[in-house]
Image: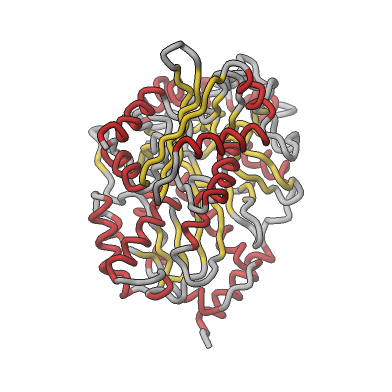
Amino acid sequence: MAILGSIVKSAIGIKHSLGKKDGNPEEQQRAQLDHLLQKASSTAFGIYYQFDAIGKAADPIKAFQQNLPIFEYETMNARWWQQQQIAPDITWPGKPDFFALSAGTTGDASKRVPVTEDMLESIRAVGLSQAESLARFDLPPELFEKEILMLSSSAQLKRHRNGHLEGEISGISTNNIPTWFSGFYRPGLDIASIDNWDDRVDAIAKAAPDWDIGALAGIPSWVQMMLRRIMDYHQLDTIHDIWPSLQLYATGGVAFGPYRESFEQLTAKPLIYLDTYLASEGFFAYNGRPDTMNMRLATHHGIFYEFIPFDERGFDEMGNMLDDPEVLHIGQVEEGTDYALLVSTPAGTWRYMIGDTVRFTDLERMELRISGRTKYFLNVVGSQLSEDKMNDAIEELSQRIGQPINEYAVSALKDDDGDFYHQWVLALESASNETDLAAQLDEILNAHNKNYAVARQKALKDVRVMALPKDEVYEWLERRKKKGGQVKMPRVMKTEDMEDLLRLQQVA
C-alpha cells in the first residue's frame, strides 16, 4: 500500500474540509479589495488615486470604480509600469523582480507585466486550492506519490537592462516552484531552462523512461506535440506504454474541446481533465470538482475582479468598449452572460482589462468558463462570431469529417470587388476537400448563429477554407517566434497575418 500517498491524500482531504470554500464570495472580494488598497496606499499610484479615501468610503467598491479609470496595457504601461521597471513603489510596494512577457496571441509585440513576490504567492495559493480540490476526486493514494510533468515556456529568464528578470509567466513560475514540490516536479529546472523548444522537448523525450509521471500540465497543443515526440523517440503505441501511472491532465490557455479527440488517441486509458485559468496577470480560476470543465473563481486569493457585460451595456457592435461601460462586481453578475474581465492584483495591476471574456455557469459554486477574447470577436459584417461559437462549430465540423481540427484561424478579408468573405485556415492531419469544408462550416454556422445567417444573406458574400497540415502551421508559428510554452494560435487573425499564412499554400 502507498503509505505516503495515503497520508498526503488524507492531509489534502482534511485541508479541503477546513478551507474557505464555503465563504461568501462577495464578502471575500470586498476583503481582497480592502487589502489591495491598504497595501498600495503609499505607492505613487495609490497616492494619485487616493486609496486611503477610497478605503474609508461607505462603499469602497463604488468609490474604487468612480475614482479609477479602466486600464488597458498601452495606458498602464506608458504611465506606470515603465516607471516600475526602474523605481520602487510605483503601483505596488517595492520593485518587481520579474516581468512576464505576454504570449502575444493578438499579433502584438510582447507586453511586460509586473510579477511581484505577492503575485507569486497568490499563484501558489490558487495552485494549493487546486490541489486541495483533488479531495473531491476518486483518486488512488498511489497517484500522490507520482511525479508531475509541467510543460512550460523556457525557464531560462533574461536579465533586462533595468535589472529585473523576464520571461513568460510559466517560466517565471517554474523558477519559483516551492522547495517541497521540487521533488515531484518534472522535467526539472535544467531541462526546463533549455531555450530552444525542440531541444527542450528532445531532452524530455530522452529522460522520459526515468520518470514515473502521474499528471501532466500545459497548453494542449504543445503537450500533444511533446507526447508524440516521446512516443516516436521510444517507438510507443501510447504514452501509457512508458507512463502507466498517468491519470491527470491539467489543461489551460485555450479551450480543450478541439484537442480532446486527438489527445485521446495518444492514451491507452481515460484521463481526468482539469481546466485552469492562468494568465500573465495572475491565476484566476481552477477546476474544483469532477465531471466538469467549468472552473471555480479564486475569490479569496488576493485578486479583485470586475465584470463588463460583453453586450450593448459595455461594448459596441464592433467589440470596442464603450466610453462609459456598465461595470459589475461579483455580487451583481448573472449566469449565462459573457463578461469582459477586469482584475486588480498584488502585482500593481489595477482595473486592468486582460482581454478575456468569461461566462458564469454556476453562481452558487462560483464556477465559470472562458468564453473567448474581446479581440477574438469577428463582427465586421454583423456575423457576431465569438470564440465560443467558433470552437463549437469547429468541433462539429471535426466530428463530421472524422478527424480532429486542433488549430484554426479566421479573418474577414475583401475580394477583388470589395466584398467581404470569411477566410478560414484549418490545421488537419490528412487532406480534405476545401470546398466541401467551407460548405459544411458555413452550414453549421448558419444553423446555430442567427446573426451569422443574416450576415450571409447580406454583406458576407463568401466563406473560404484553406486546409494545411498541422505541422506546417506549427512551423509557421515557430518562424514567427511563437512556438512552445504558453503561446496560442490566434483564432481571429489580423489581415496581414492571415495573408502571410495563406502564402504557405502558394509555396506548396
**Where is 275 relative to 62, above or below?**
below
Most extreme residue toward the bottom is 1
* Rendered location of residue 14, percent (x, y): 65, 70
* Rendered location of residue 31, percent (x, y): 66, 41
Q: Is residue 316 visible?
A: no
Most extreme residue toward the top is 417
Seen in the image, is 497 located left or right of residue 283? left
Colour scheme of the rendered structure: secondary structure
Q: Residue at x 75, y 37 (%)?
A: 334
Q: Which residue is drawn at 28% across and 46% down?
A: 157
**Where is 398 relative to 347, above or below?**
below
Q: Which sits in the foreground, 196 or 304?
A: 196
Q: In the figure, residue 443 lies in which quadrant?
A: top right
Q: Residue at x 50, y 38 (%)?
A: 436
Q: Which sits in the foreground, 213 or 198?
A: 198
- Number of numbered markers: 0
Seen in the image, is 20 located left or right of residue 151? right
Q: Is residue 386 visible?
A: yes
Seen in the image, is 282 located left or right of residue 136? left
Q: Which sits in the foreground, 22 or 354?
A: 354
* Rendered location of residue 72, percent (x, y): 49, 24
* Rendered location of residue 36, percent (x, y): 57, 37
Q: Residue at x 52, y 49 (%)?
A: 401
Q: Which sits in the foreground, 98 or 71?
A: 71
**Where is 192 relative to 315, above or below?**
below
Q: In the figure, residue 316 lies in which quadrant?
A: top right
Image quadrant holding the C terminus, namely top left
